[in-house]
Image (cartoon, helix red, strand yellow):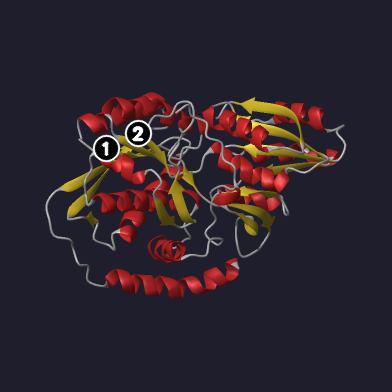
Amino acid sequence: MNRRLFHTVAWAAALAAGVCAAPAAFAQGKGEVKIALIASKTGPLEAFAKQTIIGFNLGLEYATNGTLTVAGKKLVVIEKDDQGKPDVGKNLLAQAYADDKVDIAVGPTASPVALAMLPVAEEYKKILLVEPAVADSITGDKWNKYIFRTGRNSSQDAIANAAALDKAGTSIVTLAQDNAFGKDGVKAFKDAVKKAKLAHEEYLPAATSDFTAAAQRIIEKLKDQPGRKIVWIIWAGGNPFKIADLDLKRYNIEIATGGNILPAMTAYKQFPGMEGGLYYYFGIPKNPVNEWLVANHYTKYKAPPDFFTAGGMSAAIAVVEALKKTQGDTSTNKLIATMEGMSFDTPKGKMTFRKEDHQAMQDMYHFKIKVDPAFPWGVPELVREIKASEMDVPIRNKR
């Protein structure tokens, strides 16, 4: 499947380039819509942020047919770097609303930054469209009505991973970062697992590079367990797969994790047959939006779009669709009423903002890693598409 995609991408790119070269019919009218795009452009999640920004700009191009206008208003994007620091993100969002007079904000990359930003959106009564920060608490107990999210949440990740791993006779240890992303992810995974045994939870600082002590604790918890033994890793940035160097295979302990960016998935080549739950891989979704994204990204960057590129594009499409429906009206209450329950097409297929918590309901993918010498990363082959309609994603706010 992926070989065929690469063999045909040049043709698709040429077609897309031809489409983009067609004269654009610019909308007539005055005014502009200001959008703040806040991401961790520096720091450990820099790669994630860059993908989000690229995807967002491609999404605006796609959703406006290249005009970058909606209802006669020009879309102006103001980028800001939160450096992965909650206090910086909080201040930047306040600055965007108060000084830059943005109508909508999008971001951030990291969950701790997002959690710091939520009260600011409430204070200024302006929408914050969260992409790609994952923690359940963002649309859970810390949520307010100004928060929407196109990115997947911890529960969606967990349900997808449980679909792959939750089997009777299996013992699982979780390895996660000691932050909102890791803790919410593990909590959601525990809630999703019904058949397997959860033997231990291991939390480490986000910047950990030496996993020796953690691996030893994990081995102690798993080595004498009967049946299948798995370490399920939930991690952003860094390389937690170094724990495999401590010869887990000697105890028949397997590694499992969810999807990630392509550079991180080079480590997956060590684990052929590894299964997990996936948010996006460019070769899996079959729809016109993803075809456009793959073709245009390849034309511009000579590489396929990645994990967070698709997320950035989804956020941009959501913004444009909402503005089309309001005919360019950026008043917050109008936007909220429009976006609640709104469906829109993305590279992953259709997403819908759930009215109760504004979380985008979306399909996920159960994958199995295949080693293909044509790719520098472990290729996630689709086992099964997990439809949004079959995922019982908890509503965790107290609305």
Residues under labels 2 and 1: Cα distance? 8 Å
Which residue carries the number 2 mark?
146
Image coordinates of residue 305 in percent, x first then y, are 47, 57
Residue 375 seen anywhere in this rendered image of the structure: yes
- Please rate how many residues cluster around mark 1, counting C-alpha atoms within 10 Å: few if below 14, some from 14 to 19, many from 20: some
Three-letter code for the amino acid on which mark 2 is drawn: Tyr
Name the quarter where the N terminus is drawn. Answer: bottom right
Q: Is residue 289 left or right of residue 25?
A: right
- Please rate how many residues cluster around mark 2, counting C-alpha atoms within 10 Å: few if below 14, some from 14 to 19, many from 20: many
Image coordinates of residue 278 in percent, x first then y, are 59, 49
At 30% from the left edge and 68% from the top edge, which residue is drawn? 20
At 53% from the left edge and 49% from the top edge, which residue is drawn? 261
Which residue carries the number 1 mark?
332
Q: Quadrant of residue 106?
A: top left
Q: SS of the residue at dot 1?
A: helix
Q: Which of the two labelled residues, at mark 2 and mark 1, occupies the earlier sequence position?
A: 2
Q: Nearer the viewer, residue 358 or 86?
A: 358
Q: SS of the residue at dot 2?
A: loop
Image coordinates of residue 390 in percent, x first then y, are 60, 49
Q: Are marks 2 and 1 in contact (CB under 8 Å)?
A: yes
Name the quarter where the C terminus is drawn. Answer: top left
Is 326 situated above or below 88?
Answer: below
